[in-house]
């Protein structure tokens, strides 16, 4: 199998808190009975990707799930568990229709040692990717797990394979299915398909172009509905006090009767020069919409 590439820069930033935790998705290819248990997410399990040994976004790995029962050391040492012999499979076809080599995706339980130790142990035992299932005592939901950073403990450089952390509830379903028979999955590192699109729009209520765009975009926004989070940003600024700015600033805020802003606090450009609309009027409307 081609050596998986590493998105080291982005994931290092995630570990430092500069970016959200990188997420991965596990698509259940077979059996159908397991995929049906994840009907709400269309057969997909979402998790968070480790900051070590991780591939670039857009990379996909097709594999079979393997699980060995721990003898009490939480999958932290090679003598703690034995992996079953993987069943023979011909090269599979992923969701994109391309032929792919089927590799070993090892399931392990979280706890007892660092993520790096756990994944490195599985790598030495023949794993090409690892799914870490949260502790049985954990109360974390799938949504909360996706915000966790699987951090490097400082010894992650020997790890050359990707790993994903999933919730206890979803992981148990994967473990039970792997115990019962052959399970085929596709691990993907790209933008999760079940997510909401966040659209930031910088605008002014005094801008004709903004108004025209919003009118054209209305149909698309109604089609996306709950899959769109539209966030307007208004061009409002403050000016040095003690001077007259020819009505560029709002004198009041209708949506806040008790608010009495200083005459230079909320200001906006005048959209029509000597025309009837003032910058203060634009700032007032922007504040009302906000």
Image: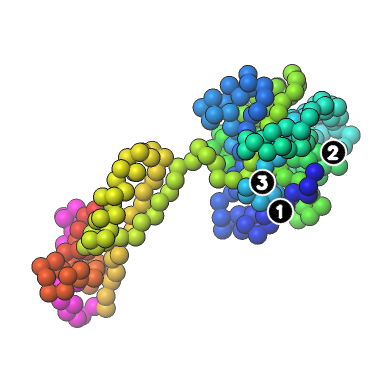
Dot 2: element = loop
Q: Earlier in the sequence, mark 3 or mark 1?
A: 1
Q: Is residue 257 above or below residue 114?
A: below
Observer-nearest of 7 and 82: 7
The residue pinned by badge 2 equals 126
The residue pinned by badge 3 equals 59
Q: Earlier in the sequence, mark 2 or mark 3?
A: 3
Please identify the quarter of the rendering in which residue 257 is found: bottom left
Quarter of the image where the C terminus is located: bottom left
The residue pinned by badge 1 equals 6
Residue drawn at x 75%, y 40% is: 129
170 lies left or right of 61:
left
Question: Which portion, as a residue range, is magenta?
Answer: 241-260
Where does the image place residue 288, in percent across and percent down from the top left? 21, 55
Residue 253 in magenta stretch: yes
Total number of numbered labels?
3
Residue drawn at x 70%, y 49% is: 54
Dot 1: element = loop
Where does the image place residue 161, in percent across and percent down from the top left? 76, 46
Observer-nearest of 209 and 168: 209
Observer-nearest of 110 and 14: 14
Where does the image place residue 53, in percent across and percent down from the top left? 74, 50
Which label sits on residue 261?
none
């Amino acid at each position: 199998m081609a050596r998986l590439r590493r998105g080291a820069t982005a994931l290092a930033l995630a570990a430092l808190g500069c970016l959200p935790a990188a997420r991965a998705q596990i698509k259940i290819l077979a059996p159908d009975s397991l995929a049906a248990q994840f009907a709400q997410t269309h057969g997909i399990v979402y998790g968070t990707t480790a900051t070590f040994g991780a591939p670039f976004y857009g990379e996909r790995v097709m594999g079979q799930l393997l699980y060995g029962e721990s003898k009490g050391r939480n999958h932290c040492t090679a003598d703690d568990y034995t992996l079953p012999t993987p069943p023979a499979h011909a090269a599979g076809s992923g969701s994109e229709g391309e032929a792919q080599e089927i590799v070993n995706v090892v399931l392990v339980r979280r706890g007892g040692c660092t993520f790096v130790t756990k994944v490195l142990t599985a790598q030495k035992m023949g794993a090409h990717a690892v799914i870490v299932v949260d502790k049985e005592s954990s109360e974390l939901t799938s949504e909360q797990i996706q915000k966790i950073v699987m951090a490097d403990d400082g010894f992650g450089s020997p790890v050359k394979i990707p790993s994903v952390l999933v919730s206890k509830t979803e992981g148990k379903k994967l473990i039970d299915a792997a115990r019962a028979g052959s399970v085929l999955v596709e691990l993907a590192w790209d933008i999760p398909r079940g997510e909401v699109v966040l659209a930031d729009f910088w605008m002014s209520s005094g801008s004709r172009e903004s108004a025209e765009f919003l009118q054209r975009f209305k149909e698309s926004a109604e089609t996306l509905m709950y899959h769109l989070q539209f966030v307007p940003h208004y061009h409002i600024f403050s000016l040095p006090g003690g001077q007259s700015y020819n009505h560029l600033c709002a004198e009041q805020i209708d949506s806040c009767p008790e608010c009495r802003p200083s005459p230079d606090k909320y200001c906006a450009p005048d959209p029509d020069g000597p025309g009837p609309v003032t910058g203060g009027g634009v700032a007032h409307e922007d504040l009302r919409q906000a």
